Amino acid sequence: MEATSYLRLSFLLMAALLLLVFVRTWVRLPSLSPEDCSEFGSPCTLKQRIQLGRTGGFIEKNKPPKYQKIDHENEVVKHPLDPLTIQEIKKVREIISKSSDFNHGEFSLNSLVLEEPLKEEVLAWKAGKNFPSRKASVIAQVGGYFHKMVVDLVLGQIVTNDISHEAGYPTMTVEDMVSSVRVPLKNKEFADIVKKRGVNVSDVSCVPISLGWFGEAEEGRRLVKVQCYSMAGTVNFYMRPIEGLTVLVDMDMKKILKITNNGKDIPLPKGENTDYRLSVQKQPLLPPLNPISIEQPKGPSFKVDGHQVKWGSWEFHVKPDPRAGVIISEAKVKDPDTGKMRRVLYKGFTSELFVPYMDPSDAWYFKTYMDAGEYGFGLNTMSLEPLNDCPRNAYYMDGVFASADGTPYVRPNMICIFERYAGDISWRHTECPISGMEIREARPKVTLVVRMSASVANYDYIVDWEFQTDGLIRIKVGLSGILMVKGTKYENVDQIDSNAELHGTLLAENVIGVIHDHYVTFHLDMDIDGTENSFVQVKMAKKTVENGPTPRKSFWTGERHIAQTEKDAQIQLSLYNPSEFHMINPSKKTKIGNPVGYKVVPGGTAASLLDHNDPPQLRGAFTNNQIWVTPYNRSEQWAGGLYTYQSKGDDTLAVWSNRDRPIEKKDIVLWYTLGFHHLPCQEDYPIMPTVSASFDLKPVNFFESNPIMRTAPMTEKDLPMCSASAE
Ligand SMILES: *[C@@H]1O[C@H](CO)[C@@H](O)[C@H](O)[C@H]1NC(C)=O
Ligand SMILES: *[C@@H]1O[C@H](CO)[C@@H](O)[C@H](O)[C@H]1NC(C)=O
């Protein structure tokens, strides 16, 4: 993460909970119907729509119709991978509370999610059949110990219960974060320091910062470093750091262990013009763009049934998860030749993030966040804002999670699903005059997007799973939100000695945007037409021609190398030694004999520059390669280890992969890391325009031919609503 006012977060959670208890309505935003412009005579123009919008008539007339009421209290399970329902979470809580092992209720839950049935069971399941028995996977703190349990909801009992002997700890609970940032506020020494720095204690906002692991000091107890900001004069308190003030807190004892006050001569940045809310913006605003939205006169083309989504040739399951954010499961695509659904991806999700800052000084060296394992990427996924986070034609899905005491709560509108038409072309050809044929064929590109956005304190991560009709899956991460900045005495670049190491960029008076990276590692359990797959690196090798029959001297060719063991699939990308990376099913071939496959097409290719022996990189060793392939193992889901908090890096993807297990013709898992180097610039201040990168999973000899050739173009009569040009 970076950090936040978790006090506010908890209020938001409570408010959301209360809201959902009372208002359990599920609404969908409207798609335009032909009547909408009736007062102007149909079809209406964009300008008329704007006028309607401005007078409010348009908006008023289109109050969102009730789409589907998800009654979370009485939600029914429809698929073996459906997340635990409110009733199931309540039952787990009851079972644990009654268990004599747990001091009758004296526990704190770090995680309570579905214990997914065995993969064989899920693959064997068919709609209408009985579910494999519903179980919960629980990580709980009881006394000083962390237990990993499986609770069987049918048997009504705890069926396995293991005490952790790992070095690391589970994900912090929201309650851990909230209580930790309150600790300094009650302390006299802290109050005096803050006052001397010119900040009223009532204006102080603190954030809980995971401190990684650097040696014995971070072992044996759960610790957090609390750093604080002034909220005076701006909601963007991140821009007013009380620099150099770090409070080391014991998370369980709720006790201050040490206060470090190193920034006495660093002034508090003024925070002028850092409030990003529209309501406080000073004129003039930028020239406004006219309203824009997607129209689907016949409604959307996708269906959501519980957590199962069907769209075009795709079918998949979407699950909100407190740690991963979104989990996509059982993604299958229809073969246009046979009409059969074919398996592509058994499970895909954000496994871990690694966000190291590049400032080795006292108040900064430990900032090497792992947002999924330390903070909970899904726990920090907030409700999406209709029309702005997702377009008007979006469907919203809620998350149902458990709080530390086991009480269920609902995170409304956590995920949105929508069809995107961004004006792109899915394929085209126009015949040039040379041939004498007049052919103009083009098809619009419409895709389906599943989106979430995690606000891990200051930073916002937008994660999109985008499905294309041609079988491609694009996984995109966007970064926005607020920089974690450092206070400095400098007010102008002219004052900075050329030898001084800033560790960032001066963004405003007294504010440095500190250099950092973001790595987002995805777990991609590909199952290409079955579980038995192989990984093939197709190296693009340069060949030279000596004394050939033509004047050409060189060309390149694809050399296939089938990975035998894990180490063959530890891939570091290289521009001048390029390769393609195929996941194939060696026993399934196209009619003409190519093995069917999908390739991972890299993008966002930043690689960590930290020393491999630097403690943060030991913990973040899953970013040492951009691609890894491991044999499927239920226990190997989290690239930074199950117990990531203060972990030493002895349970990472790198450690597993170095076992060098066989991976040929096996059920295998592909891992891909999207990377971003961030050297901040002034435009990132005081809030960052979104920066995105993506990678693709693309069919490679999977279909017999272009699967979307037999699709129809759009015509004017398909889109009867409004003319596209303002008059
Ligand atoms: C602190 O609070 C007092 C009383 O509200 C106010 O008069 C004073 O200006 C504040 N000081 C700062 C530095 O904000
Ligand atoms: C599965 O993963 C766990 C955790 O990494 C490991 O202890 C176990 O040996 C693995 N099993 C196999 C067969 O690799």
Image: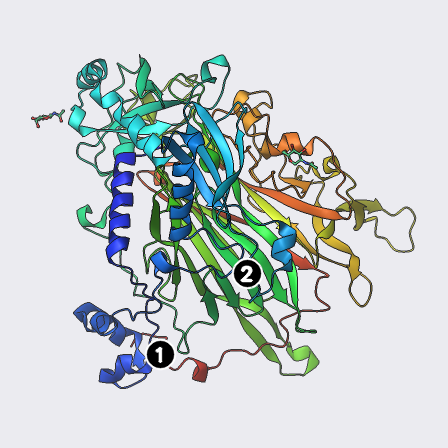
Residue type beneath disc 2: Phe
Residue at 17% x, 20% y is 198
Q: Is mark 1 within 8 Å of ligand 1?
A: no
- The residue identified by callout 1 is 723
Q: Earlier in the sequence, mark 1 or mark 2?
A: 2
| Structural crowding at the residue carrying mark 1, measured as other residues with C-alpha within 10 Å and reported as few (<14), some (14–19) or many (≥20) | some
Left or right of 355 in this view: 442: right
Q: Secondary structure at mark 2?
A: strand
Residue at 50% x, 17% y is 214
Residue at 60% x, 38% y is 635
Left or right of 287 in this view: 293: right
Residue at 43% x, 71% y is 300
Left or right of 265 in this view: 209: right
Labels 1 & 2 near each other (Cβ < 8 A): no
Residue 681 occupies quadrant: top left
Image disc number at residue 316: 2
How many marks on residues? Answer: 2
Left or right of 117 in this view: 16: left
On the question of residue 50 being in view, the answer is yes
C-alpha span from label 1 to label 2: 35 Å
Q: Which residue is nearer to you in this view: 325 or 250?
A: 250
| Structural crowding at the residue carrying mark 2, measured as other residues with C-alpha within 10 Å and reported as few (<14), some (14–19) or many (≥20) | many
